Image (cartoon, rainbow, N blue to C red):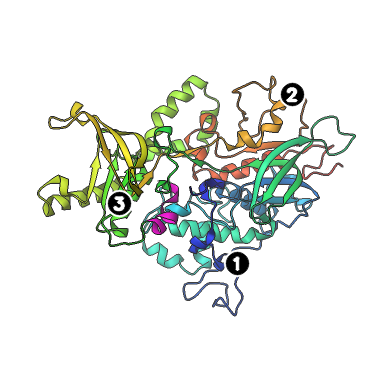
Amino acid sequence: MPPSICADHVISTDFALFPSCIDRVRGATSSDNPTTGNGHVSNGVRTKAGPSHLQHTEDNELHDLICIGFGPASLAIAVALHDALDESHAPTKSLPRLGARPPKIAFLERQRCFGWHTGMLLEGAKMQISFVKDLATLRNPRSEFTFLNYLHRNNRLVQFTNLSTFLPQRIEYEDYMRWCAGGFEEVVEYNQEVLEVSPIKSNYRSKVVDCFKVRSLNTRTRMFTNRRARHVVIAVGGKPHIPKNLHHPHPRVLHSSEYSIYVPSILTDPTKAYKIAVVGAGQSAAEIFHNLHSRYPNAKTSLIIKGAALRPSDDSPFVNEIFDPDRVDDVFHQSSEVRSAALKLDRGTNYGVVRLELLERIYEDLYTQRIKYRNEDEWPRRILNHRTVTSITDTPDSPNTVRLHIDNQSGQHRKHGTVGEESMDPDLVLVAAGYTRDTHEAILHGARGLMPGGDAEGKRWTVGRDYKVQFEEGKVSSDAGIWLQGCNESTHGLSDTLLSVLATRSGEIVQSMFGKVNDDVDMLGSSS
């Protein structure tokens, strides 16, 4: 089976499959990257951001901060730290200690290079948030790492303006983040899979835990490395979720996140009349269902959904305010009952829904089939509603297909529908069932003895408003800690797993770690 998702929804796999992970992430010289005198690009080759104010730290030194994962969340923290150290801007009063010396920092990433949603960079797919909600603008519009500066540095600002849109293509936004990541190469260690974070004391005089050991495996050399840090951020993103009823160890059953990476090598003939099943009713399922026709125009594609129809996401202005950075305060301070009810009510903005523009394109495509074909059974693309896949098994005597066992309840809703079991033998199944966000629980297994009230089976880590993990009172030094990113939806709201609040949140986390003045402690890690 293909490998799993790692930091911030990015695939960890053989990057020979990734054209986006070639040398263009490196800084190009004047001989191999034609630029103009002001650093802009020409002939379609882009520049690299940076370099940043962050400097490399040797593995054996005590780090001020180690970020586990280098996806958008950690990248935003890198940008926030750079901006706080940038002498060209007025120093942020709430971060008085950051100007003392460059912090000792490392970012550990499992991938071979930066990438974001690599398996879903589909042609024509657009972002679902405004470019203003980039890695910096809402916190510091003057930052070097804004999306507008990326366009300016790459000589596309005027042309982008002519598009009259706030929603760039997904491939461009991924390129923007890759451009930002290029400015921090000195402090990022790729091919590093973090195995555990455990509490330790920096020396024999320490009475409480005052730093953490971060143990990682180099996935290329298979060598282990132990690093120490006073502050640790865990931002490893989500793991692809495939429900038990759809879990089947077969190379032709894929998660939606693997779509662009593996499908071309599995279905190798673009002209062949493949049978393809997509399971799910959200944005990813709809995008794949729509994209398959351009990849395999002769294929028969089925979108299997439980409900009656694909439903639109609500991105109206008033509802969109639930993703405002200051809304996190409101959500966190609600009672758990009120918060749970609000989250359930707001799920229609993000889960199991599709942007209206895409819905209209899909509907128009299906309508065109009504013109071309008399019988709906002849349609090359169909939405099979009121159906649930109950299991997936091997197809007898056919190793290149699998069998879907489907519970059809359409007869409960339609006059000419049926009720009962049916089956389908597709050449490929794509499961768009979202992600799970609990990897931090395994990484922090060795620290469970520090949980408030002690360890207990089934107990999970909790965080404060500043995303800092809550430990037993008096067990961990006030100038040390662990922060969690992208796994706090139940306490911080729907925006927690999204890009919307990254710029503001990264500044809050930097302030939480380094912004409090203490006469006895240098917030960058050395005793005064």
Q: What type is the residue that disc 2 sits on? A: Glu
Q: Residues within 10 Å of mark 3 (few under 14, many from 20)?
A: some
Residue 497: percent from left, percent from top:
51, 40
Q: Tell which circle, 3 or 1, labels the residue nearer the N-terminal end.
A: 1
Q: Which residues are magenta?
A: 257-266
Question: Residue farthest to the front?
Answer: 397
Q: Position of residue 193 (x, y in %)?
A: 64, 48
Q: Nearer the viewer, residue 403 or 507?
A: 403
- Residue shown at the point (13%, 29%) measured from the top left: 415
Mark 1 → mark 2, Cα distance in angstroms: 45 Å
**Residue located beneath label 2 in the image:** 473
Identify residue type, mark 3: His
Q: Which residue is mark 1?
A: 26
Predominant SS along the magenta part: helix
Figure check: 160 above or below 338: below
> Mark on residue 290?
3
Determine the residue positioned at 51% across, 57% down. Answer: 147
Callout 1 amino acid = Arg
Q: Where is residue 483? Give x, y as percent.
A: 65, 37
At 41% from the left and 67% from the top, the residue drawn is 159
Q: Position of residue 91 (x, y in %)?
A: 69, 51
| Left or right position of 446 against 407 | right
Residue 396 visible:
yes
Query: Magenta stretch containing residue 262, yes or no?
Result: yes
Q: Residues within 10 Å of mark 2 (few under 14, many from 20)?
A: few
Mark 1 crowdedness (10 Å alpha carbons): few <14, some 14-19, many ≥20: some
Marks 3/1: CA–CA distance? 34 Å
- Which of the two labelled residues, at mark 3 and mark 2, occupies the earlier sequence position? 3
**SS category of the residue bearing label 1:** loop
Q: Are marks 3 and 2 in contact (CB under 8 Å)?
A: no
Q: Residue furthest bottom?
A: 31
